[in-house]
Amino acid sequence: MRRPSRPTLLAVLASPGDEADPPGGALVTSAWRGARTVLVTLSGGGDSRLRQAAERVALLFSIESHFLWEPSGEDEALRLARILRAVKPGVVVANAGAWGVTEGAWRAAADTSVTMPGLPLFDPDEARLWFTTDEGRADAQIDVSAARPLLRAAWFLYQPDVPEPEPRGREYYAFQGGCPLQQAQPVTDLFVGLAPGLPKPITSFLPEEP
């Protein structure tokens, strides 16, 4: 299976506005490091106000392909599986509201019995699936401190009258499947050990730890 020439991160969110929370920071920092970034938002496409805000956030975050879904009556996991086969991401990340759909799509995209004309099978051994989690259950902790201004902007675009929470400097992820991790956890790069990986390091604005 031919992989894209650039590493690709696919993020799956439950609804518009989730960009201000994990995995929003990973989307921003991965794009800055040279990745192709793709965002699927499972709802909200029928609301013009949300769509406008989502389009602005996609520009802010340098997202190259953005899918904001409207209800279609189609099985969401199969719909997402088609994107997995077409995009061939090396890294897939999903927030809590999108876990079930993403897990189903991950399986369907690699299932030989699921036919999708023109789309070759997705190979999970060449990719890695991550779900957002908290620090205590994390297999990866990602420095997203450089992305905090854009995460604040995303919050404001969706909720201008609601005080934003304290911006976080790290995001935490649980490994769910695919290419095994070859080093001690928690790792600090979602692309670690994947070929191709990202050549640029993560820029940090966190205080140095003693």
Image (cartoon, rainbow, N blue to C red):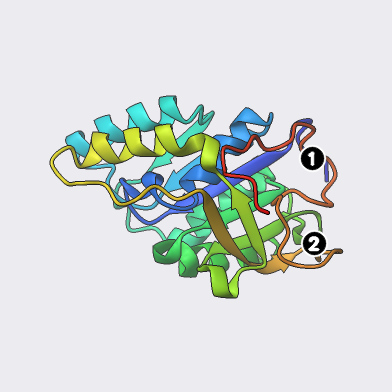
Q: Amino acid at mark 2?
A: Cys
Q: Amino acid at mark 1?
A: Arg
Judging by the rendered image, the residue that carries numbered circle 1 is: 3
Residue in the foreground of this view, choosing between 114 and 90: 90
Cα gap from disc 2 to disc 1, whole angstroms: 15 Å
Q: Is residue 67 above or below residue 15?
A: above
Q: Position of residue 67 (x, y in %)?
A: 43, 39
Q: Say what secondary structure mark 1 lies in.
A: loop
Position of the C terminus, as image quadrant, is: bottom right
Mark 2 and mark 1 lie on one chain; the one further toward the N terminus is 1
Visible in this render: residue 118? no
Visible in this render: residue 66? yes
Q: Position of residue 139 (x, y in %)?
A: 67, 67
Q: Residue at x 55, y 44 (%)?
A: 144
Choose mark 2 or mark 1, whichever is in front: 2
Q: Position of residue 131 (x, y in %)?
A: 55, 64
Q: Residue at x 51, y 48 (%)?
A: 169
